Structures are given as C-alpha cells and as structure tokens.
Image (tube, rainbow, N blue to C red):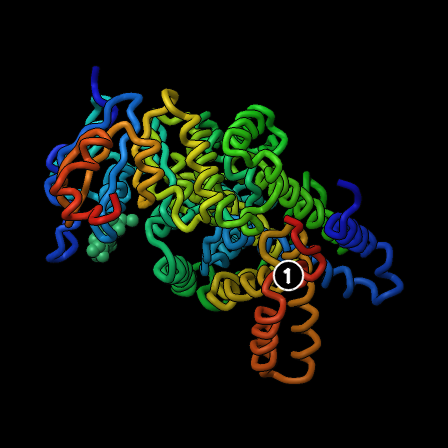
Amino acid sequence: MTAALTLTGLTKSFGALRATDNVTLSVEANERHAIIGPNGAGKSTLIGQITGEIRPDAGRIAFFGADITGWSVPKRALAGLGRSFQITQLCADFSALDNVALAVQAQQGHSWRFLRAAQSDASLRAPAMEALARVGLAARAQTRVDALSHGERRQLELAAALAMNPRLLVLDEPMAGMGPQESERMIGILQALRGKVTMLLVEHDMDAVFALADRISVLVNGALLTTGDPAAVRSDPAVRAAYLGGEA
Amino acid sequence: MGLNRQTLAGLIVIACLMAVPFAAPLLGGNYVVTLATRVVILAIAASSLDLLLGRGGLVSFGHAAYFGLGGYVVGIAGFHLANDVPIFGWAGSNEALVVWPLAMLVSGFAALIIGALSLRTAGVYFIMITLAFAQMIYFVFVALKYYGGDDGLSLSARNLFAGERVTNPATFYWISLGALGLCLLVQWRLVASRFGMALRGAASSERRMAALGFSVYGYRLAAFVIAGMMAGLAGALWANLNRFVSPDMMGWVRSGQFMVMVIMGGVSSLFGPIIGAAAFLLIEIALSGRTEHWQVIFGPFVLLVALFAPRGIWGLIRAKGEP
Ligand SMILES: Nc1ncnc2c1ncn2[C@@H]1O[C@H](COP(=O)(O)OP(=O)(O)O)[C@@H](O)[C@H]1O
Ligand SMILES: [Mg+2]
C-alpha cells in the first residue's frame, strides 16, 4: 500500500540557517504520526513545505503516490490535504458556521455561483454543522469568530479541516496556548478520530503526543533524529539527550 | 430577522430617492432633480468600487478609469454619428440601449486587462499599479486631440432611450435610479452567493482560503470586471447627464473621490455608498460656495470621519455585531 505522505531528502534554508535538513519520512495511511522537537527545530517549516506555503530547496513530496512538490496550496487542499495553523488563521468577521461552510464549498468546487444565497444553502450548512458538532462547537455556530475564545478558535480550525474530508490531516500545535481543560478536550476530540483519518501532528505537549501518536518522529536542528513508536522514542538515549531531558 | 435598523434605514433611503421627483417642485424644481441624479449616478460608481474595496478588500485606486471609459463610449459614439464619419465601418449610435451596454463592455474589458495584471501584486503595489494604469488611460485621452483632448467632447443631445428622446430631467432621473436599483440588486445577490463568500473570505484571510482550496485570483478578477462594468454604466449616464465628457472623468482626483464616498458612506454595505455620494456632493456644494480651496477643509473632515467612524456613516446605523 502506498504511504499517505512521503518526504524524500527535503531541504530548506533561510540564509545560512538550515531549517529543514535532508528530511526523509513517511506517514502511512490511517496512521497518526507526531513530530516533536524543541522550539526552532523546524517543525512549522516542515509543515509549510508539506502544505505548499514554503517551497523546498531540494527534495520531493509525494501524497498518496502523486508527486505534489510543485503544486500550489489550493491544489493540495483540494487533493485532500487539510491543515490547521499554529497561529489561528480564520475569517474573523465571519460566523463559525460560515468559516466551516467555506471549507465545504471549496470541496464541492462550485464557487462560480452568483445568485443563490450561500447562507441558506442546506448542502453547505448541513455538512458544516456536522463538522462543528464533531468538535463540540455546535452551540456556537452563529457566533462571529472574533467573539470566540482562543480555545474555541482552535476547535474551529479543526472543524474547518475536518469539513474538507481530508485524506491527510496536518495539525500544527493544535493545543498551542490552551489551558489544561481545553487541551484535554482537544485530545478527546482527536482521539475520537482514530482510524477515520490519517494525521500528521506537531505538538509540544508530551502527554498529548504519547496519548495520540502511533509513531513519533523527532526533529532537531532541522534534521530527523529518529522515528519510532512512542515507547521506543521515549527510551531512546539520543532523544533523551537532545530533547526530552529529564521530562520523560 | 424582523425589521432591524439597517433594513429600516435602507427603506428610508429608497423612499427618499423615490420621493425626489414628486417633492422637487416644492424644493427648487429641476435643480434638485439634477442634483439627485448626480447623487444616484455617483452612487452607482461608488457602490461598484465598494465591491472591490469593501467586499474584496482590494484597494483599487484607479476606479475612475472605467467611469471615464464608459463616458467616452457615449461621447465617441455620438461624435461619429453627429459628424457622419463611421468608426470601423460603424456609423456610431445615439441609442442608449446600444451605447450603454457597449460602454459596460468596454469598461469591463479594460478592467479585465488591468485586473489581470494588477491582481498579481498586493498591498501598496496593488494601489500604485491600479493608479498607474488609470493615469495612463487618462493621458491617452488628453493626447487624443481628435476627440477633443484636454477639452473633452460635447454631445449635441442625450442618447435616445428605446427610441424616445429624454429631455425631461425627471425622466432621466428615473432611468438613472433604475440603473442604480439594478446594480444594487446584483450586488445584493452577489455578496450573499458562493462567489461572494469566496470573495469576502479572501479579503478576510487569504491564507485560510488557500488552505481550504480556494484559488482567489479568479474570483477577484471576476469582481474587478463586474465592478468595472458597473462603473462604465455610471460613466455613460454621467456623460448623458452633462452632455459632456472630458479626461477629468478618469483622473486620479475622481478615483479619490469615489474612495472618499465609499469610506465616508461605509464600506461593505449596500446603502453606504449612496449616503457617501450624497454627503460628498452636499459638502462640496456647501463648502465650494464659501471658498475656492474647499478641498483643504474637506480633506481633514474626511480624516475625522475615518478616525471616529471607521465604518462610515452607515456604520453608525449598523447596530453592534450586525453583519
Ligand atoms: N521565513 C523565515 N525566515 C527566516 N528564518 C525562518 C523563517 N521561518 C522560520 N525561520 C527559522 O527557522 C527555524 C525553524 O523555525 P520553525 O520551523 O518555526 O520551528 P518550530 O516550528 O519547530 O518551532 C527557526 O530558527 C526560525 O527562526
Ligand atoms: Mg512552530
């Protein structure tokens, strides 16, 4: 079976800094794969190359067997690559429901409709409501994004990604800036997705990573230190030295 | 939804516009009707700019170019007819139902070309490049001595409307108001449609839209063409109202005035640009009667509006939290 995502020799430099250093990695279908590493290790840069916002200097990216290295961000999204941002990127003056409905609209590929009102279109509303319900935001559907709490916005990011029916869900620190209760809730939501969606997760919260991931890759100074199952990574002396320290 | 403040205010605006021809005899006759016609025509241009500025988040600083081109289509078609010299084998025309759609096509085509090039840039570059294109067209018409150059072109008469002469100011007002009504109806549907959601989403967060799978360039370009066509219609009406066109119609001062009308009236609203156009004309009349340098007073006034009512006059009507 082809892997969901295969990175081969991916490299990206910012001036003299090698933010991604010859990374070769694969995410299997239905796997939940986590990337961990200290701040500045190059996790977001790696995500940026996978989603298409950043062009790699060298290397290839394959998505379910197709070479997507040269594809634009929207083309990758329509091919089934859903993502959430580390720093929330939402349409702030839209309601929560409208944000998710946009995801559905993009999937349906019919945005060249000029006359019918989108906000009363059940073929957009129903799937969007379903995605909101999955992340526990159904009651906040009509609330404008700028009136949502930080935690709710993170959930909304996830709902929008889910509404895309992604073949691969890429999440950049979905728990960033959340309190312990909100984090726990988000972990619960992500756990409920087990077996339903392939996931590539960047996360700082070690409890979350060990609770969620089937496999973990450790990134240090842009390079891949190791990949393995949680138990192996936890006990790997090189990982402990480079990153986990006394924490694990 | 009930009758919220915006709906109520919108109905009042519509009622006032409809009442003008009936109230005019009490207020000052044809002068008032002509003034109201100017408001209505400028409102068409301003509201078409709002589709870009407000809904699309695209600060186009050359919108007068499409207004002026629309006017010149009327002027040139009339010029060739009056002088009995065919243009590309066409005798020219004096029929509104031929010339006005042609004005919209020409302006829309110009918007397609200019939009296609300028939408590849963003931010300040976008503002500068749209301004530069408009100034280029402006200087082309200044240099076109055949069509009057700097002095412009006079029309011997207004266009016939479905074969009928339109000499009564009130009749021309109703025609202009009908055009405004159509444009607002189109905008109203457009903004609420899937296309409108894509356009507004791109204004709100381009990164988010790309991540969802939207290639926003095409939607923006379509908005550019639609706005250009509406501005072209406004220009054709303006040429008919004044029976005169000149390069001033497409200069940067005009473009700036359209922006002021939108911002003062209220961006991203259906009726804001109408109020903005009315406020602009009334202030112009009030101030220019006192001093030749009225713009010196007007400039800071606009600044104050932008500072204290960032969503314009309509923003004061719009209740908190309303879309
Ligand atoms: N656009 C950029 N220009 C220059 N340096 C950058 C840019 N983006 C990231 N970096 C640098 O690359 C390194 C990796 O950053 P990042 O991928 O954000 O790390 P992480 O997400 O693991 O914290 C950091 O040293 C950061 O300062
Ligand atoms: Mg990061």
Q: Residue at x 36, y 36 (%)?
A: A83
Disc 1 target residue: B265
Q: Secondary structure at mark 1?
A: helix
Of the 4 image quadrants, the one containing the N terminus of chain B is top right
Quadrant of residue B289 within the rendered picture: bottom right
Left or right: where A32 falls relative to B55? left
Residue sitting at the far right: B26
Is the CB atom of the residue marked by disc 1 within 8 angstroms of ligand 1's nearest atom?
no
Q: Can the viewer see residue A75?
A: no
On screen, residue B299 above or below B66: below
Q: Toward the viewer: B307 or B183?
A: B307
Residue B167 in the image: state x and y as whole percent: 74, 53
Quadrant of residue A43 within the rendered picture: top left
Residue B130 in the image: state x and y as whole percent: 40, 57
Q: Toward the viewer: B126 or A208?
A: A208
Count of labels in the image:
1
Left or right: where A43 falls relative to B207? left
